[in-house]
Amino acid sequence: MRVLVAGATGALGKELVPRLVAAGHEVFAMIRSESSKARASQLGAVPVMADALDRAQVETAVREAAPEVIVHQLTAIGHVDTRHFERSFAATDRLRIEGTDNLLAAARATGVRRFIAQSNGAFTYARTGGPVKTEQDPLENSPIPAMAPMIAAIKHLEKAVLGATWTEGIVLRYGGFYGPGTSMAPGSQQVELVRTRKFPVVGDGGGVWSFIHIADAAEATVAAVENGGRGVYNIVDDDPAPVAEWLPALAEMLGAKQPMRVPRFVGRLAAGPAGVVLMTELRGASNAKAKRELGWHPAHPSWRQSLLG
């Protein structure tokens, strides 16, 4: 199939494009700058130029590629400062709103038959009920102010993609990425904070995280291109775990001292309200539907064996 990947040179795109090519697909990479052309070509894709926030440019690029499938992986997330959570996600929020709308408009104009979009299953489920959520469970309806714009952008993306009756809309709710090129890669700022004992467990550390190795996320996306049906899929590993469990385990993997433990009010001062939510109230996600319907199984079923690799 002809597949257009928007966000082809990001952490996930760099894993996804070669896999799509190896599976026999003709892959096009929507890129914004001339400097990205060589990277896209090295990955095996044909580059097409467009700024995702410029609707006319996006339609021109989509018409040039004439894809059967669009894969929307556009983000602009760098280091996440939990004290300024909304600032860290502002550019990505815009891509998830305006970028999604522009890609969908171009897809409709050119008759794209399947549209796959990156969503977030790591931060977005309602902070009530059980510790592990399925795709049937609601997203957060009462987010704290710092997280409200990010949740709103996710909801916009999902509603737009799933509501596009003229194409087969698929939403992939990825867990927290780890592996090469991610914020959990060896030597990354986040890992170094753990190594130097500057990443404490806040409160009871009861927030449940679901992780996914970046290579497994890419494999699941290929499966969605080939086998997915309209709807939402959690793309996470088999082992959701509370912060009080995975953070000390990561410190042990690093040969570092165990993380400090601080009460919620201290965590709020150091990491902001969003940091406290992530540490104490987050919910994990189940991958049962993705396994069942996509025929996908993570090669890294647990972060315990591979969080640093």
Image (spheres, rainbow, N blue to C red):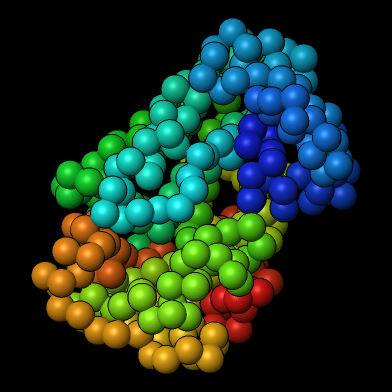
Looking at the image, residue 149 lies above or below residue 142 = above
Picture layout, residue 291 above or below residue 261: above
| In-front residue for pair 204/121 | 204
Task: Locate residue 172 relative to residue 126 in the image: left or right.
Answer: right
Residue 51 placement (x, y as % from top left): 60, 20
Residue 141, quarter of picture: top left
Horizontal side of 216 relative to 212 (left or right) equals: right
Identify the residue at horizontal 41%, vertical 29% (top origin).
Answer: 94
Identify the image quadrant of the N terminus: top right
Kindly indicate the quadrant of the structure image that contains residue 220.
Answer: bottom right
Is residue 75 at all visible to an observer of this figure? yes
Whether 251 is drawn above or below 210: the answer is: below
Position of residue 218 measured from the top left corner of the image (x, y, whole percent)? 67, 54
Residue 104 in the figure: left or right of residue 137: right
Give whichever of 232, 7 is nearer the camera. 7
Instruction: State whether residue 165 appears in this view.
Output: no
